[in-house]
Image (tube, grey):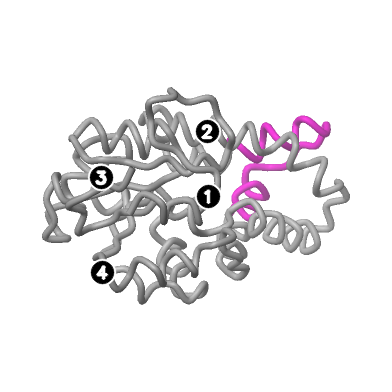
Amino acid sequence: MKLTKIDHIFFDLDHTLWDFDRNSILAFQMMFDKFEIEIDIHQFLKVYQPINLHYWKLYREEKVTKKELRRGRLIEAFAGFDKQFSIETIDALSEDYINFLPLNNYLIEGTLELLNYLQPKYKLHIITNGFREVQNTKLINAKIAQYFTTVTNSEDVGVKKPNPIIFEHAIKISGANIDNSLMIGDNYEADILGAESLGIRAICFNYHKEQIPADKLQVSSLNEIKKYI
């Protein structure tokens, strides 16, 4: 089933195009090396990742601030290893992690092939909930910034996906309209339901292998997207 009358495609960035998990491991390893933290990185991530996802959900729902997210996810993860640090050290660890993160820029398999396939046919855009100070750097360092006409960041708009306001803003600055737009992202709640709440068609890149309704358009690899557009 081909989606017709699409002129503008909006992508999420982390876990959709930019390989957040792989790049995050490398950033944490740099941070651990600097602070001489002797915890196996893979064991740490098993504890950290679900905590991080929980804090991002709270952040999207405006239940925690950016600072609370950055602090809380580290404090709780280290607590799982019976390690405690001062708030000053937690803040230093958090700052270094954010700074180290865009130094590694692996992309999800198939990203460049998909962007090269789409760019001649469509206007491409980014809508992200990620932190302003790192998202643009990721795009530049990963050498994919040139593919995108606009980048909409939740910190600039003042609301986060799935709030329809951020999608309205992205539509407005792109010159698109709801009927000729498509959203592609990994997060069912933020990207898919958020876009659909405004009437924007969406494809879920089911990176996390979640159970989502069977009537929702979903793919398990970026290459599959070519079948639909």
The residue at 71%/55% (across/down) is: 25
Answer yes or no: do the residues labelled 1 and 2 have beta carbons within 8 Å? no
Residue 214 rendering spot, x and y as whole percentages? 44, 24
x and y, in percent, of residue 146 in the image: 36, 76
Name the side, left or right, on which 229 lies relative to 223: left
The amino acid type, in three-letter code, at marker 2 is: Tyr
Alpha-carbon span between mark 2 and mark 3:
18 Å
Of helix, strand and loop, which mostly describes the magenta segment?
A: helix
Which numbered disc, 1 or 3, marks the residue closer to the eye? 1
Q: Determine which residue is flagged by label 4.
A: 149
The first of marks 4 and 2 along the sequence is 2
- The residue carrying mark 3 is 158
Identify the amino acid type marked 4: Thr
In the picture, the quarter occupied by the N terminus is top left
Label 1 to label 3: alpha-carbon separation: 22 Å
Single out the residue that lies furthest toward the front: 1
| Label 2 crowd bin: few (<14), some (14–19), many (20+), radius 10 Å | many
Residue 52 sits above or below residue 24 on the image? above
Q: Position of residue 17 (x, y in %)?
A: 49, 58
Instruction: Identify the residue position indicated by label 1 in the image.
Output: 15
Could you tell me which residue is drawn at 30 percent across and 34 percent down? 194
Residue 57 is situated, as x and y percent measured from the top left of the image, at 46, 31
Query: Separation of disc 3 and disc 4 at Cα?
Result: 21 Å
